[in-house]
Amino acid sequence: MTAENVLTVLKARGETLAFCESLTAGLAAASVGSVPGASHALRGGLVTYATEVKAAFLGTTVKALEAQGVVSALTAKDMAVAAVRHCGSTWGISLTGVAGPDLQEGHPPGTVFVGIAHHGGTVETFLATGLYGSREEIRTGAVTFALSTFLGILEKS
């Protein structure tokens, strides 16, 4: 339902959306793309699962990306901005985090950073906590968190 609500608002405003996803591997874009009429607002997305791919997409080096943290608010911000830039969208949403079962960079499974960027330059990052369960439950929860957070921003702006 959240994806439908997001698309309704974006379509009414004539705005567009793009994704850059890591742990969710395209699940967020797919959830929006599954809604009839998604083509009115969904511009595209990229899955940057591997650190090397993420670094290339962001225009940085693996070493620099690892220094700031692949799973971090700063990387989520950079990913969201890159989604806007590369896809020519009004908004960009990024998701980077740990689906588990192992720790990554000291972060436990369920740690997810979401970046939301506007083409006008505004960028916000959010930390999802309390996501538990299987890899799939964490990934699905991350998408729900990202879209709900984005809808809240849309409703306030």
Image (cartoon, helix red, strand yellow):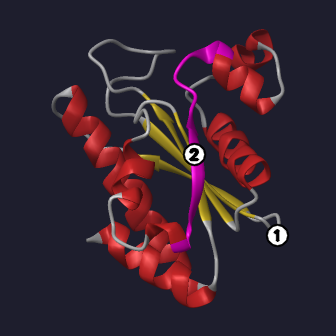
The x, y position of residue 67, in whole percent, is 73, 16
Residues under numbered marks 1 and 2 in contact, where contact means CB atoms less than 8 Å apart: no
Magenta span has 48? yes
Q: Identify the residue shown where x is 55% and y is 27%.
A: 71
- Let me know if residue 19 appears in the view: no
Depth-wise, is mark 1 or mark 2 nearer the camera? 2
SS for callout 2: strand
The x, y position of residue 99, in whole percent, is 33, 27
Amino acid type, residue under disc 2 in the picture: Gly
Q: Identify the residue shown where x is 20% and y is 38%.
A: 137
Amino acid type, residue under disc 1 in the picture: Gly
Q: Could you tell me which quadrant the C terminus lies in?
A: bottom right
Quadrant for residue 56, please give it. top right
Q: Earlier in the sequence, mark 1 or mark 2?
A: 2
Quadrant for residue 146, please give it. bottom left
Magenta highlight range: 40-52
Q: Which residue lies under the disc numbered 1?
A: 120
Q: Identify the residue shown where x is 54% and y is 79%.
A: 10
SS for callout 1: loop
Q: Which mark is residue 59?
A: none
Q: Is residue 148 left or right of residue 157?
A: left
The x, y position of residue 59, in whole percent, is 83, 28
The x, y position of residue 60, in whole percent, is 83, 23
Magenta span has 49? yes
Q: Which residue lies under the disc numbered 2?
A: 45
